[in-house]
Amino acid sequence: MIVVVITGGENSPTSSFADDPRWLLVQRIVASSTFVSSPRLSTFLLYVSKQCLAGESGSLNERCIGEMVFERSPGYDPRDDNIVRSHASRLRIRLQDYFEGEGASEELRVNIPRGSYVPLFEQADSGLQAAALQVSPSESALPEQDPNATPTSPRFWRRVSKILAICLLLLAAAIATALTFAYHRFRLAKQESPTHKLWSQMFRSDQQTIIAPADSSLVIATMMVGHQIPLDQYAGGLYRQATVCVEPCDSRTVHHIEGARYTSMSDLEFAVKVTHLPEAILNRTEIRYVRDLELRDFKESNLILAGSQEADPWLSAISGKMNFVVHDDPTVGALRVENRQPKAGEKNEYLYDPHDPQQRGLATIAFLPNLTGSGNLLVVQGFSVASTQAAAEFVTNGRDLDALFSSYSGNTSKLPHFEILLATEEINGMASRPVPLAWHTYP
């Protein structure tokens, strides 16, 4: 529950600037369709705006906002919890969307500059820039001949120079147009690989892409308490408030582990590698700890998830859409990958033996629509760190995915959604090149 109170009666702190056009702008923003579905971002904007307009900008730091807006405990360490920074990034994007859409006619603008949490209010550009770019009538055409201008007069040479400058500008514009046209022709003509198509669909200029490494803290806590954490407890943080041990354990130690934010190096390497892909759009991309995800993210954004359900309970929200389902809870049965709709020659399930002396592993890759069909999900998971790492390499190296879906190369069609089951072999904790066991594509 958000406890920040922004509005009130006559004696409310906001009453002194209730008629301030900056405060009225903020009220319109949070009431807009761009923000109405994001109560936390709305509360964030209201709080920092109130503090700014009340002359309390000096108190707007990460720890204060975390305590007042996101209910973090007093004195918490922002280095271990980036919720304020991640929401500030999302707030900047939402504000940009608002002023590019339903707020395009606003005379005032507000933004949260990077590196600060103090809102900046400024007058909107009312077309002065556009007017400045217009060429005056006297300069929009070639100058008229002056009967007094002779080939030897300074006036003549000034006019000749002006004519040459205009001609050079026109020539440069023509060359730029021709090069742009040739470039687009080249792009349409070149063979687009399946890997390029995959990442072009995961990164879009009109939609946010979230990369969420797995929660290794949760895996350690699960081993200590003897059972996995269901999504309803994980998403709301309830599991951290009342630790339930199936087997003897130290609840204080478990609580400490649950509060930590650990992940694996392979997951972080995968996240960094994805952000360096040529298709990545950095100002629309965010690496967020899986514990900070919300159901809305699965409906509105493109999501890239790494790790199995043991380390990411959010997978239970989308496993119903999957054909290859990873069962990684040893307390409810054998570790296996279920094949819900096997094709000819495929098994109903593929067993995983963690004690296999040959250390053979299994991993899956799922490229599916998000929960509303407005974006895409990419889930890379395995029974071990090495097998998950192998699956991540499969979709980023520009070789394995292209070979598997070679029929989709050399045309402009989109890559269909798909699922792949991979077999891996681990050597000294590292997975060898994976081998596809089965794969399904969907229209």
Image (cartoon, grey):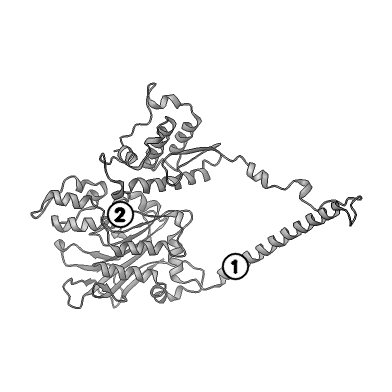
Q: Which image quadrant for residue 185?
A: bottom right
Residue at (15%, 56%) from the top-left corner?
227
Residue at (28%, 50%) from the top-left corner?
80
Residue 286 lies left or right of residue 156; in this view the side is left
- Tell me if label 1 and label 2 are in contact, CB under 8 Å: no
Q: Position of residue 169 (x, y in %)?
A: 72, 58
Q: Residues within 10 Å of mark 2 (few under 14, many from 20)?
A: many
Q: What amino acid does circle 2 point to?
A: Val
**Quick check: 24 above or below 87?**
above
Any part of residue 201 in sight: yes
**Quick check: 35 above or below 278?**
above
Q: Position of residue 197 (x, y in %)?
A: 46, 67
Residue 4 lies left or right of residue 405; in this view the side is left
Any part of residue 322 in sight: no
Depth order, front residue of 92/352: 92
Q: Position of residue 72 (x, y in %)?
A: 27, 41
Sequence-first tag of 1 and 2: 1
SS label for mark 1: helix
Which residue, as the protein is rendered here, is positioned at the far left? 248
- Residue assigned mark 1: 183
Q: Position of residue 147 (x, y in %)?
A: 91, 50
Q: Residues within 10 Å of mark 1 (few under 14, many from 20)?
A: few
- Residue assigned mark 2: 290
**Quick check: 359 above or below 33?**
below
SS label for mark 2: helix
Residue 416 lies left or right of residue 410; in this view the side is left
**Quick check: 279 above or below 343?**
above
Depth order, front residue of 115/192: 115
Residue 390 lies left or right of residue 146; in this view the side is left
Q: What amino acid does circle 1 point to?
A: Tyr
Q: Which image quadrant for residue 198?
A: bottom left
